[in-house]
Amino acid sequence: MGPGPCNPYPEVIEAMGRPLLGHLDPEFIALLDETNERLRTVFRTTNPLTFPVSGTGSAGMEAAFVNVVRPGDAVVVGVNGVFGERMCDVAQRCGADVVRVEAEWGRALDPQALIDAHPSPAVIAVVHAETSTGVRNDVACLHTGHEDALVLVDCVTSLGGIPVEIDGWQVDLAYSGTQKCLGVPPGLAPLTVSERARGRIVERPSSWYLDLNMIARYVGGDGARAYHHTAPISAIYGLHAGLGALLDEGLEESWARHRSCGEALQAGLEDLGLTLFAQEGHRLPELTSVWVPTERLRDGMDEAAARRALLERYGIEVGGGLGAYAGRVWRIGCMGHTARPRNVMLLLAALEELLEV
């Protein structure tokens, strides 16, 4: 139940063991097209350029930035955790004039502050679900106020777990990761790009590998396929199967399951006398952050020893805090196939055994 890779859906494990096809084999191309269509459904978009980037979520982040940010562009970035900081780093490497809008870790960003941060930004970028803190940032209104600004959103920990409405929120670029709420091993970064953003793609991005001008010729689905790179066949088999399991359950039903498990976990932690870290009203159901109860751990354990005991005794992985909150906050993932009541009950029972009453 850590914030990293979750247990995959059983269908995914089976699919990834299928015999390999060539990356230009017509059967594989048909499966890739179907995977892309399933991604459109999960992203809630009709964007033709929607596909899995061959790389983890950070590759999706870099692909989003390097393709639309030019040197000197004003890029507004919301920063209230590790991945907002990473956005700033990537944008700076593209030569952007980065305008930071900050909130304290554990608190949500003010969307109006993002809109008001610059009179004419090229891009407004924000992390929807900040993995380092368990905070949900509001995205729906970011398109207002700046007609020409592209809205770029990190959906790594939100896609499949809480509502994501790319077209409804008028988001121009969004990326995710497979290992969170999609219930698929890490290695791919679903990406969707609006037609408006496609019109703003840099003619020659700094990254050859992530150049959407070239990749679109392979994944665009227009019948004119052009080789760009060797797609990770087995990983796409797994994503195809994971998206199938998610859509068979129903997207709204998956959101409800994550919400129910998250609420039960957070209520259970408070019943144990623990204090939640993320701001009330902006807590992610799929990733719960909680202050480490150091003074209540049995047998003089420190927080690292307690997490190690959870892993070795009960098979439960709990993530530690990041940055200034390392050793002070735990991050508990309850997402994808792992978001089940039995796992919530097991974790709460295990924590009760590690705590002084």
Image: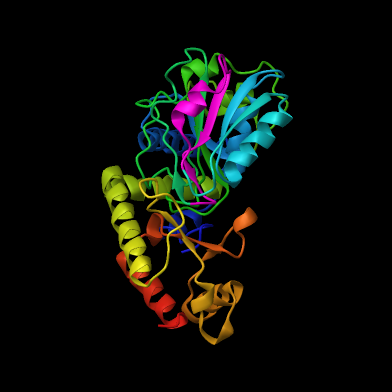
x, y (%) of residue 166? Answer: 40, 29
Is the residue 264 above or below the residue 145 in the image? below
Please report the residue visible at 42 percent of the width from the left and 32 percent of the height from the top: 139
Q: Does residue 117 show up magenta in the picture? A: yes
Q: Is residue 97 left or right of residue 154?
A: right
**Quadrant where the image shows the C terminus:** bottom left
Which portion, as a residue range, is magenta? Answer: 108-133
Is the residue 332 above or below the residue 237 in the image? below
Q: Nearer the viewer, residue 34 or 326?
A: 326
Q: How many marks?
A: 0
Colouring mode (rainbow / by chain / secondary structure / one colour): rainbow
Q: Does residue 73 show up magenta in the picture? A: no
Q: Is residue 207 visible?
A: no
The answer to which image quadrant residue 341 occupies is: bottom left
Q: Is residue 246 visible?
A: yes
Q: Nearer the viewer, residue 151 or 47?
A: 151
Is the residue 130 above or below the residue 199 in the image? below
Please report the residue visible at 70 percent of the width from the left and 18 percent of the height from the top: 72
Q: Is residue 351 left or right of residue 301?
A: left
x, y (%) of residue 159? Answer: 42, 42
Q: Nearer the viewer, residue 52 or 241?
A: 52
x, y (%) of residue 250? Answer: 27, 45
x, y (%) of residue 266? Answer: 36, 61
Is the residue 140 above or below the residue 262 in the image? above
